[in-house]
Structure formats: C-alpha cells, structure tokens
Image: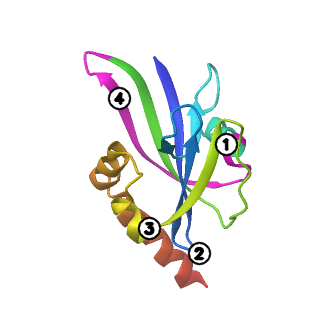
Amino acid sequence: MKIYVKGIVYNPYKNELLFIRRNEDLKWEVPGGKLETHDHVEMSLLKRIKEDIGIAVEIESLEYAKLCGDLSKPTHLVLMYICTTPSEGITLSLDHSEYRWKDLDEILSWEYLEDYYKEEFIKYDIVERLNNIFIKVHEEE
C-alpha cells in the first residue's frame, strides 16, 4: 500500500494557507508526496515540502491518517500534518504550475478547493486548530 505524507502549510502571521496546483491534472493540493520505503515519516514530509515549494516548515502536529479507496482493500494511506512557516517566497517544483496563499477565513468557500479537502477540514476541525495556532503566535508577540 502506498503511503503519502502531506502538509497543510500555514503562515500564522498572515493567517493564510498555501495551496499548489499540479501540472498533471491542474488540481489544487497541499504540498507533500509519497513516502519511500525505509523513510522516516516526518523527515520525508519536510523533504517533500521543501521539494514542492522551496521553503522550510516546522511540523506542528499529525492531524489525521486516512485510508483511501475501498475499505476492504485500501489503495493508499494519507498522513496529514499541520506545518507552519513565516516564509512567503515560494519556489515551485516542476510538477506544479502555480501557488496561492488563501486566507483561513475564506478557505472553505474557495471554489477551487477540492471537496474532499473541505470535508476533511470540517471533519477534523482544521480551521479551528489553525485559529488556535494564530492566537498562540499573536499572544507571544
């Protein structure tokens, strides 16, 4: 079974999430990629994100693990993390054509966000978790 590590990249200073657009099918996604055999999960996530967007991030938490495909024979597992960065200067990989920083308050109504992301963000209270990071960062200032 394939395992994918993905990172919801959040800039808590601007209250924005990063999405990147795949060249392959023009769909918007969060950075990350396939976990290779014997890779350390979090090290692989940091590497894949750096490859996709050219910036370093800090892993905040593993938010959920989701089996995809038929439940009797899943095709892959997605490990979704929340990551933070103060950086905005993105350098995309050749696999991606564009990026967008989207305001957290508008994310669930963004027309280009795939429904499964919206469903997962609601199911796992992602917006609320990111709001908590935002509050924490701004209390420390």
Q: Is residue 66 magenta?
A: yes
Give the quadrant of residue 45: top right
Q: Residue at x 34, y 60 (%)?
A: 108
Task: Using the numbered discs, state the Cα–Cα distance from disc 3 to disc 2 in whole angstroms.
Answer: 12 Å
Judging by the rendered image, the residue that carries numbered circle 1 is: 52
Q: Which portion, as a residue range, is magenta?
A: 51-73
Judging by the rendered image, the residue that carries numbered circle 2 is: 13
Closer to the eye: label 3 or 2: 3
Q: Position of residue 123 (x, y in %)?
A: 27, 51
At label 3, the amino acid type is: Leu
Sequence order check, earlier mark of 1 and 4: 1
The mark found on residue 104 in the picture is 3
Q: Position of residue 13 (x, y in %)?
A: 59, 75
How many numbered marks does the figure carry? 4
Task: Using the numbered discs, state the Cα–Cα distance from disc 2 to disc 1 in whole angstroms.
Answer: 22 Å
Judging by the rendered image, the residue that carries numbered circle 4 is: 67
Sequence order check, earlier mark of 4 and 2: 2
Q: Secondary structure at mark 1?
A: helix
Is 32 displayed left or right of 72 in the figure? right
Q: Position of residue 125 (x, y in %)?
A: 32, 58
Report the front residue among 58 and 116. 116
At label 1, the amino acid type is: Asp
